[in-house]
Image (cartoon, rainbow, N blue to C red):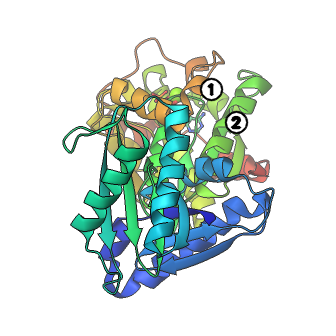
Amino acid sequence: MDKIILVRYEEIFLKGLNKHFFENKLIRNIKHRLSDLGIIKITKSQSRIYIESTDFEFDIDEAIIRLTKIFGIASVSPVIRIPSEYEDIKKTTVDIVGELLARKPYKSFKVESKRGDKKFPMNSPQICADLGGHILDAFPQLKVDVHNPDFIFYVEVRENTYLYSEIIPSVKGLPTGTGGLATLLLSGGIDSPVAGWMIAKRGVELEAVYFHSYPYTSERAKDKVIKLAEYLAGYCLSIKLHIVPFTEIQMAINEKCPHEYLTIIMRRFMMMIAEKIAEKSGSLAIVTGEAIGQVASQTMESMLVTDNAVSMPVYRPLIGMDKNEVIDIAKKIGTFDTSILPYEDCCTVFVAKHPVTKPSLQKTIEYEKVLETEKLINDALSQTEVIKL
Ligand code: ATP
Ligand code: MG
C-alpha cells in the first residue's frame, strides 16, 4: 500500500501536438516547488500525474497545499495505491472509510468507480454495488445516497487500484513558463497583484516594476510591495522586482506641468520606464491593475493617452471588473491583507485637486515638452534596484 498524490489537469488536454510541452513544463514546476520536501518520483500516465516519495519525512499535506497553488493543476487527491486484487481492495476500503469517519461523522456516501483495466473480473456498476455493500456492513450508521452524499468513495481500477475520497480544487490555468514573460506594474494596492495573478494564471512568467517615491513613500511601503511580489512568486516560481526611484520625475512634473495633468503625465512616465525594462528582459507586454472608470486616470480617454506613450501592448485583466470582484480574488489568492496595510502610495502624494478625467492627447504631449524626458528616464533606470524573489 502506497500513499501517493494524484494530480489532474484540464486545459492541457486541448493542446493537441503541444500537449507534451505543457505536461513537461508542469512536471518541471511541480519538481521545483516540492524539491525541498524530500526525494519525489513523478510519473505521467493517461493524462494524469502521480507523485510519490519513499522519503519517510515527506509531508503530503504540505505538498498538497503547494500543489493547489501551481498553475496548470485542476485538482489533487491524496490517494492509496494497492495492487488490483479485489480482496485487498475491500479490506483497504474499509480501513480508509474507518479513518474518514474517525475525523468526521459522515452519514451518507456513494461509491464511484472506473475500470481502466478491462481484464479485471468485475465491471464498474458491480464494483460500486459490492464495495458499497461492504462499507454498509462495516459501518451500519452510514446509508447510501446517490444524489447528495456526504462523501464519495472513489475506486479506480487500472494496472494498480487507486482509492480516495477527496478531490481538492487547485488554481487551474496553464503551467508557468508556457506563455512568455510580461512586465507587471506592481503598486502596494489591491488591484495590481490580482492583475498580475490573472496573467500569470495563463502560463505567463512575470517580472514586476514598482515606482518608489522616497522619502514621500516610506521604506515600509516598499517592504509591502516586496511582500506582495513574494506572494505572486509563490504562484509563478520566481519574480524579479525592479524598484525604480520616482521622486525626481514626480517633482519635475509637479514643478513644470499643469496640475490637472500631473497624474496622467506621471502614468505615461511609468509606462515608458516599464517598456524600457520590458524590452531589456524580453517581455512582451505591460500589465496594470486598471479598470474602466475606477479613478480619473482610468477613464477610457485617460488610458488612451497613457497607452500612447508606449508601443508595447498594455494588458489590463481587471478592465471590466467591479472593485468587490477584485477584492474577492485578492482574498482568495492571499494578497488582500497585505494590500490593505495603510502605507502611502506614490500616486496619493503628488496628486492634483481636480485631475482631468478626459485628458487631451495633444495637450498632454504639449505639456510634456518642457520636461527632459529622456534624461529623467535614464537617470531613474540607472538607479533602479533589482530584487529576485
Ligand atoms: P492598485 O490597487 O493596483 O494600486 P489603484 O486602484 O490604486 O490600483 P492607480 O493608483 O491609479 O490605481 O494605479 C493604477 C495601476 O497603475 C495600478 O494597478 C498599477 O498597475 C500601476 N501603479 C500605480 N502606482 C504604481 C507604483 N507606485 N508602482 C508601480 N505601479 C503602479
Ligand atoms: Mg494604487
Query: Residue flagged by tag 2: what amino acid is it?
Result: Lys
Under 8 Å from ligand 1: the CB of mark 2?
no
Question: In the figure, 168 relative to 11: above or below?
Answer: above
**x, y (%) of residue 350?**
58, 20
Under 8 Å from ligand 1: the CB of mark 1?
no
Rounded to the nearest angstrom, the CA distance separating label 2 from label 1 is 8 Å
Mark number, residue 173: none
The residue carrying mark 1 is 338
**Between 368 and 329, which is closer to the camera in this rendering?**
329
Q: Under tag 2, what secondary structure?
A: helix
Question: In the figure, 337 relative to 121: above or below?
Answer: above
Counting labels gives 2
Circles 2 and 1 in contact, beta carbons < 8 Å? yes
**x, y (%) of residue 278?**
58, 61
Question: In the figure, 38 relative to 107: above or below?
Answer: below
Q: Residue at x 51, y 40 (%)?
A: 100
Q: Residue at x 71, y 34 (%)?
A: 248
Q: Residue furthest top?
A: 353
> In the drawing, does residue 219 fall left or right of residue 42?
right
The residue carrying mark 2 is 227
Kindly tell me whether residue 344 is visible in this rendering.
yes
> In the drawing, does residue 108 fall left or right of residue 278?
left
Nearer the N terminus, badge 2 or badge 1? 2
Query: Residue flagged by tag 1: what amino acid is it?
Result: Thr
**Between 331 and 104, which is closer to the camera in this rendering?**
104
Kindly tell me whether residue 179 is visible in this rendering.
no
Q: Residue furthest front?
A: 137
Question: In the figure, 143 relative to 28: above or below?
Answer: above
Q: Residue at x 57, y 33 (%)?
A: 335
**Between 176 and 195, which is closer to the camera in this rendering?**
176
> In the drawing, does residue 38 fall left or right of residue 69?
right
Q: Residue at x 77, y 53 (%)?
A: 382
